[in-house]
Amino acid sequence: MSNASDIHRSHRVGWLRAAVLGANDGIVSIAGLMVGVTAAGADHRTVLVTGVAGTVAAAMSMAAGEYVSVQSQADTERADLATERRQLREAPHRELEELAGIYRRRGLDPALAGQVAAQLTAHDALAAHARDELGLSETLRARPLQAALASAAAFLVGAALPIVAALLSPPARVEALVWASTVIGLLLSGALAAHAGGAPVLRGALRVGFWGVLAMAAASLIGRLFDVSV
Ligand SMILES: [Zn+2]
């Protein structure tokens, strides 16, 4: 039983990590975009429009990319299952022996491996082959739409941080406030991800903060190169 709850815990951490990564992506890329155009001399309104347009475009692009990637994974799984179903129909004895071989390689003695293979085949042959031969399980079964919505939503949550900061800040302070909110947001999300994964919190926070600051500094530098107001 303790084994099963460990697996659940690591699934949850994986899901949370993906959400935090998507949110960081939203924070860093949109804050970088806004800091870049601010450094290039753009006015308050242009900075906000850039942030919102960039957010919509990037969130949709992430959702589409995720959908296509998970969908093609689902297509591969479906094709694998179809092959398996055909083999079970055309060569049931070979498939039974294949399954027994898998259990022997995992450490069962030949008699027990044969028994397990026979019982699982009688119970649900396709499920046994999907799980033990192909490594597919119900929880791993790809869900393209869900994955697409989740990654877009995580990105939107992250991107909202620099946009709201810019919206609330006086026009002359946009760059400073976007910087500050981004650094704070990244430190918090880095700490959260580290805490959820059981890793050292401070190190996780600083690592995420460091790369975010580097990306923002690069965007700001590029903006300054294009500064039209000097
Ligand atoms: Zn098989």
Image (cartoon, rainbow, N blue to C red):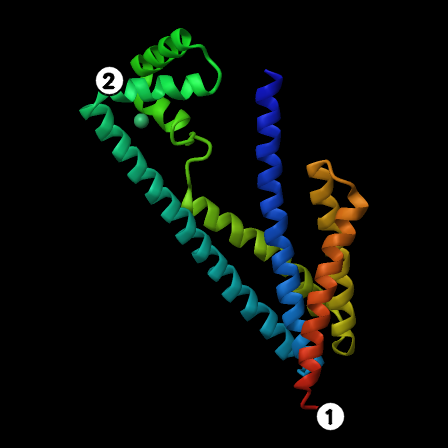
Mark 1 sits near ligand 1, with its Cβ under 8 Å away = no
Which x, y percent locates residue 48?
A: 63, 73
Which x, y percent locates residue 206?
A: 78, 53
Cα separation between marks 1 and 2: 80 Å
Q: Give me the residue at 53% from left, 51% from top.
A: 151
Q: Amino acid type of disc 2?
A: His
Q: Give me the residue at 46% from left, 50% from top.
A: 148
Q: In which quarter of the image is the C terminus?
A: bottom right
Which x, y percent locates residue 20?
A: 63, 48
Which is nearer the eye, 15 or 56? 15
In the rendered view, does 136 fall on the left or right side of 16?
Answer: left
Q: Give me the residue at 58% from left, 46% from top.
A: 18
What residue is shown with label 2?
93
In the rendered view, does 98 fall on the left or right side of 18?
Answer: left
Q: Using the rendered image of the protein, determine whether residue 44 is visible from the camera's viewpoint.
A: no
What residue is shown with label 1?
230
Q: Amino acid type of disc 1?
A: Val
**Image position of 182 with respect to 200: above or below:** below
Residue 137: name its quadrant: top left
Residue 218: name its quadrant: bottom right
Which is nearer the eye, 22 or 89? 89
**Image position of 182 with respect to 21: above or below:** below
Tell which quarter ligand 1 is in: top left
Judging from the image, what secondary structure is the residue with disc 2 in? helix
Q: Which of marks 1 and 2 is nearer the N terminus?
A: 2
Q: In which quarter of the image is the N terminus?
A: top right
Tags 1 and 2 in contact by the CB under 8 Å rule? no
